[in-house]
Image (cartoon, rainbow, N blue to C red):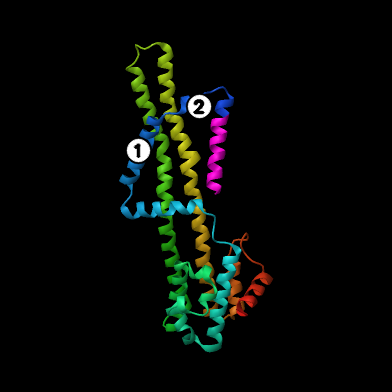
Amino acid sequence: MLVLVGYLIVMGSVFGGFVLSGGHLAALFQPLELLMIGGAAVGAFFVGNNGKAIKATLGALPSLLKGSKFTKALYMELMSLLFEILSKVRKEGLMSIEGDIESPEESAIFSKYPGILSDHHIVEFMTDYLRLMVSGNMDAFQIENLMDNEIETHHAEAEVPIHCIAKLGDGLPAFGIVAAVMGVVHTMESVGLPPSELGMLIAHALVGTFLGILLAYGFVGPLSSLLEQKMHESSKMFQCVKVTLLASLNGYAPALAVEFGRKVLFSTERPSFSELEEHIKNAKSK
């Protein structure tokens, strides 16, 4: 929603200022300029990216119109889930959670937290490393290294649409210049026309440069920044799971292990110690 609000502000400021200065909006309506700029940009996008990158970019676009799902409530769900699992391990042993991690959809513990269960990426990350803990064949240092590598892979995959959109935005001003040059060429071949008509052709040509810059910095470029912010938000879920499980592997009690996870969260979503404690108590009573 904020994306649409931002677009309205951009258009209102630019076009409103143009009208207030005495300009006529009809002069800016140049669909053929948009066709040249947009068509060339889309074509270059397909040329410069493989099928996987194109699919990832198109798949990421709908998320830009949605608000962040990584709220304080979701993080408290995650930490409550981790606390319950680690408490069960501490009381009944590692083998007691084998059924929970093999079929989380059927687990009595996981089913209490639908917000986490609906995110298959974080569920897979959590259950994979709990499974390694159950196997007992790897120490904390090996698991930490493996976690770091997986999180790095997650970053690399999430950065693909960010880079694709950023490069698309970077190319738009150049394609705007191309459209403007085409307009100038058309003007030069029409030098026999009256000055008023030549002036209109020159104005139409300049619109190409204007549109290229506006689309790049007012519409496309900000999307890559927003995607980057969303990537960092999603990474915090993995980091929270990582430090909590590692703390447990190093012998800390579930309450302290979860506190390790709480500390890595952004301050804007991080629950206080008492908030998390109360949430865990309520979850356990269900």
Which amino acid type corresponds to the residue marked 2 in the rendered image? Leu
User: How far from the left and from the top, in percent, is residue 173?
Assistant: 42, 35
- Circle 2 is placed at which residue position? 25
Residue 39 is marked as 1
**Is residue 72 toward the left or the right of residue 102 in the image?**
right
Q: Position of residue 162 (x, y in %)?
A: 44, 51
Image quadrant of residue 170?
Answer: top left
Q: Judge left or right: residue 35 versus residue 261.
A: left
Residue 221 image point, x, y percent? 47, 43
Which residues make up the magenta segment?
1-16
**Residue appearing at x 35%, y 51% in the figure:** 54
- Is 6 inside the magenta-drawn segment? yes
Which residue appears at 56% of the width and 22% of the height? 22
Name which residue lies at 41% across and 37% down.
172
Does 247 sit above or below residue 121? below
Which is more toward the observer, 232 or 108? 108
What amino acid does circle 1 point to?
Gly
Q: Is residue 200 visible?
A: yes
Q: Is the magenta stretch mostly helix, strand or loop?
A: helix
Residue placed most toward the observer, 120 or 136: 120
Answer left or right for 94 relative to 51. right
